Amino acid sequence: MARLASQEVSELLRAWSGGDKQALDRLMPLVYDELRRLAHSFMARERAERTLQTTALVNEAYLRLVKVKQVRWQDRAHFFGVSAHVMRRILVDIARSRAFQKRGGKAREVSIAEAVNLTSKANHTVLELDDALNALAEIDPRKAKVVELRFFGGLGVKETAEVIGVSPDTVMRDWRLARAWLLKELSHKEA
């Protein structure tokens, strides 16, 4: 049953990419709950005083995704990978805006320890994590994409492998190396 739903989502995504506006209307009810789960996982890492709610994050991501015209959707995993990237960008934009408005004040903090197992006590800002991922992307774009898809997108190893076009073993190897690299990079910022 889940396989049929996944296949239907992939077909609707390809139809939407092809210009079928009605495909988007049929797609959204199928992916909305998963987008909310994804947004909820982002918001669970945010500090308690956050002002953005899960539904608002999903709605903002939806509005940005609808505006994207040049994406040739491959499948469900690709869609959720891009959705994760869009949600990450939204949170980074909000954090940058808040830091700018406070003229150097602290941005909201986000704990990456639970999902990435980097450290047991590390709390890093969204901006620090974004900077570290951007630095990793300059060195090794594939490893940065693996982190984005797995950590932010909530994709499994197999789905991540499909999106990137590598084997699951390669994803696991990249995941381990990227976590170690991020740990080192973020620990330098604490010192």
Image: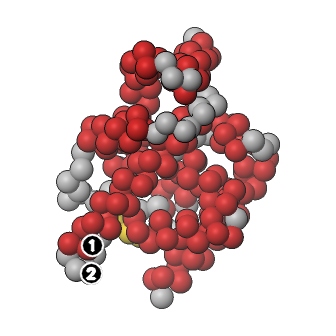
Crowding at mark 2 (Cα within 10 Å: few <14, some 14-19, many 20+): few
Q: Position of residue 125 (x, y in %)?
A: 38, 69
Marks 1 and 2 close (CB-CB < 8 Å): yes
Q: Secondary structure at mark 1?
A: helix
Q: Position of residue 162 (x, y in %)?
A: 70, 37
Residue at label 1? 99
Viewed as shown, does residue 64 lie left or right of 154? left
Residue 97 shows in the view:
yes
Rendered image coloring scheme: secondary structure
| Residue visible at 59% across and 18% down in the picture | 11
In the picture, which quadrant includes the N terminus? top right
> Closer to the camera, 76 or 18?
18
Which amino acid lies under the numbered mark 2 shown in the image of this protein?
Gly
- Asked if 25 appears above or below 121 in the picture, the reply is above
* The label number, if any, that marks residue 140 in the structure image: none
Q: Secondary structure at mark 2?
A: loop
| Residue visible at 52% across and 42% down in the picture | 82
> Closer to the camera, 5 or 115?
5
Which amino acid lies under the numbered mark 1 shown in the image of this protein?
Ala
Viewed as shown, does residue 161 lie left or right of 155? right
> Closer to the camera, 44 or 138?
138
Disc on the earlier residue, 1 or 2? 1
Q: Quadrant of residue 21?
A: top left
Residue at label 2? 104
